[in-house]
Amino acid sequence: MQITKHTDLRDGSSCELDFDEANGWLRAIWLGYVDPTEAYNGAARYLQAMQGLRCPYLLNDNSRLSGPWFDSVEWLRSVWAPQAERLGLRYIAHVAQPQDLLDQAASLSGTSFGDTLHLQLFDDVASAEEWLQHMQAHS
């Protein structure tokens, strides 16, 4: 079930947020070149959606992004993550852009996203889905 989708009319990039009813998690799908403003807005739309859903699982799919990854890890850690945690988020499966997996792992290593918020990086969607299913089975 699609919750929200924003498409940048200038270049066709988009951020879509769906609730995957079959699996019981939220799925954020980022496409194209997403500039920092779009990234902040997409993250804010996620928080708005969480107001009513309170879903503990998020699959954040960056596998089809082009250009640089959203580079504000400090903002995600200090502003976004505490709000998401208060709204019930517990597990984030983050699928990185294939060429950026090592850079993203380095930028996120040692970064705390809260006491109860667990972030795991993946290089493919299937592995991320498998991890979320495992987390659901053991929660």
Image (cartoon, rainbow, N blue to C red):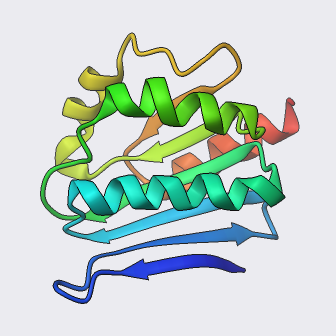
Of the pair 106 and 73, the residue shown nearer to us: 73
Q: Quadrant of the N terminus?
A: bottom right
The residue furthest bottom is 9
Residue at the (25%, 89%) spot, across then down: 9
Whether residue 53 sits left or right of residue 30 in the image: it is right
- Residue 129 in percent (x, y) is at 62, 52
Q: How many marks?
A: 0
Nearest the viewer among 92 and 17 is 17
Task: Give the residue drawn at x 41%, y 15%.
Answer: 111
Location of residue 34 by image quarter: bottom left
Residue 107 is left or right of residue 25, and the answer is left
> Quadrant location of residue 45?
bottom right
Residue 110 relative to residue 71: left or right? right
Work out which quarter of the rendered image holds the C terminus and state it. Answer: top right
Left or right, residue 81 beside residue 66? right
For the residue pair 84 and 62, the one nearer the viewer reads as: 84
The residue depicted at 75 percent of the width and 40 percent of the height is 87
